[in-house]
Amino acid sequence: MRILLKLFATLGERLPAELAPGAAVQEVIDRFQLPAGLVHLVLVNGVYVPPAQRASRRLVEGDALAIWPPVAGG
């Protein structure tokens, strides 16, 4: 199954990614051992996935999963 996984900022060090068919967003987070404190903004195809939905939101062929850590600016 082809799913594009984008990890931004310091999370990018954890690529490359190969995902199982039908994986839930939380399963991907767990598989790549992404620290909970660094998984802040999660988007599937540009749509925000809140923490309460990450265990049930399944990925399908062609999805783009983007994960951002907390970002501070100035």
Image (cartoon, grey):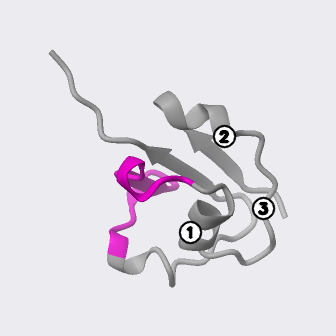
Question: Picture coordinates of residue 8 (x, y %)?
Answer: 50, 34
Residue tagged 1? 25
Give the residue type at disc 1: Val
Q: CA distance from mark 3 to mark 1?
A: 10 Å
Residue indicated by mark 2:
14
Quadrant (top left, top right, bottom left, bottom right) of the N terminus = bottom right
Marked residue nearer the N-terminal end (3 or 2): 2
| Residue visible at 50% across and 30% down in the picture | 10
**Helix, strand or loop at mark 3:** loop
Residue under the image location 54 percent in, 53 percent down: 34
Structural crowding at the residue carrying mark 2, measured as other residues with C-alpha within 10 Å and reported as few (<14), some (14–19) or many (≥20): few
Helix, strand, or loop for circle 1? helix
Camera-side residue: 37 or 2?
A: 37
Name the image quarter holding the C terminus. top left
Q: On screen, 15 above or below 2?
A: above
Residue that protrudes farthest toward the bottom in the picture: 56
The magenta stretch is 34-51
**Mark in the foreground, 2 or 1:** 2
Q: Amino acid at mark 2?
A: Arg
Of all residues, the one furthest to the left in this rendering is: 74
Tag on residue 19?
3
Q: How far apart, in angstroms, are the residues tagged by discs 2 and 1?
A: 16 Å
Mark 3–mark 2 Cα distance, whole angstroms, equals 13 Å
Question: Which residue is drawn at the image coordinates 46% and 74% (left, top)?
Answer: 54
x and y percentages locating residue 13 in the rendered image:
64, 32
Q: Mark 3 or mark 1, which has the lower sequence index?
A: 3
On whether residue 46 falls in the magenta region, the answer is yes
Q: Is residue 16 left or right of residue 40?
A: right
For this rendering, which residue is in front, 28 or 34? Answer: 34
Return the mark for residue 72.
Answer: none
Q: Secondary structure at mark 2?
A: helix
Residue 51, above or below 18: below
